Image (tube, rainbow, N blue to C red):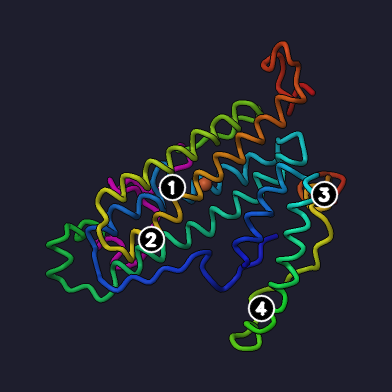
Amino acid sequence: MFIYEKKLQYPVKIKNTNPALAKIIISQYGGPHGEIGASLRYLSQRYSMPYPELKAILTDIGTEELAHLEMVGTIVYQLTRDLTPQQIQEAGFDTYFVDHTAGVYPVAASGTPFNANTFAVTGDTIADLHEDLSAEQKARLTYDNILRFADDPDVRDPIKFLRAREIVHFQRFGEGLRILTDKLDSKNFYAFNPSFDK
Amino acid sequence: MQFAMWELHLFLDTHPNNCDAARKLEEYRSRAEALRKEYEEKFGPLNETSRETSRWAWIRDPWPWEREAN
Ligand SMILES: [Fe+2]
């Protein structure tokens, strides 16, 4: 089960409204490399993980991604507070506003709603862990791209925190992969799927 | 403090036998417990937390979705 804690993992205190930036950052809420996809990927993959270390790391990182989802939602929310009709139009936020007003909806920056096609659950431990390593890099590069457009230090600070977490997760998944391969046929890691073939 | 605890928590997932990290976590936990009490007295409850045992107890089978746990 999950228990909610009434605080953010890392503080978000943005003073200035910036709907144009919100439109970009929302991609980490519901986009192809975003936090909801990350959480669903790990929390769904864990069922077919064969070793306790792997069940633990997928459960824990999948849970942390939910905390990141909340941080990204908070950033989007704070960037779209007290909007005037003029700000909405000038920032190009009108195409989002017409359907969602100032609500936070899981979409990519391009406007595509969140889709589970953005991630995989293969039931093959090697394939899943490699996907996880790749996913952490994709999230990291998206934060790097967001940082190219964000000059407000109030926004850059929590985004840099989220970027750093992707790197830690990549490290932990790398260790997970090593724990797995240590237990496989050292002459041929791909001889069987340790989750299904045993 | 809680963040440092979480970092150790993740580290111990992939290093369940690392006594140094487990000890450090134990040290932080006792400090965090006092801080949590102080915080909750001021701002109300954060959540319901059980007393942890060891890191191995955390990763050990069965997990909630497994037959053995139900
Ligand atoms: Fe991550």
Disc 3 from disc 1: Cα separation = 31 Å
- Residue type at mark 1 is Gly
Task: Please tell me which residue lies in front, A15 or B45.
Answer: A15
Using residue B18 as the reference point, say whether residue A80 is left or right of it.
left
- Residue type at mark 4 is Leu
Tell me: residue A177, above or below residue A32: above
Q: How crowded is mark 4: few (under 14 residues within 10 Å), some or many (20 or more)?
A: some
Q: Which of marks 3 and 1 is in front?
A: 3
Disc 4 from disc 3: Cα separation = 26 Å
Where, by quadrant of the figure, is residue A193 drawn? top right
Q: Is residue B56 magenta?
A: no
Asked if the residues shown at circle 2 and circle 4 are in contact, with their CB atoms under 8 angstroms apart, the answer is no
User: Secondary structure beneath disc 4?
Assistant: helix
**The N terminus of chain B lies in quadrant:** bottom right
Q: Residue A81's x, y, as percent? A: 29, 73
The outermost residue toward the front is B20
Q: Mark 1 lies on which chain?
A: A
- Residue, x 70% and y 60% (percent of image)? A1
The residue beneath circle 1 is A34
Disc 2 from disc 4: Cα separation = 25 Å
**Main SS category, magenta section:** loop
Q: Residue B67's x, y, as percent? A: 84, 44
The residue beneath circle 4 is B35
Q: Nearer the viewer, mark 3 or mark 2?
A: 2
Using residue B56 as the reference point, say whether residue A104 is left or right of it.
left
Using residue A113 as the reference point, say whether residue A23 is left or right of it.
left
Q: Nearer the viewer, mark 1 or mark 4?
A: 4
Q: Magenta region: which residues?
A: A97-117
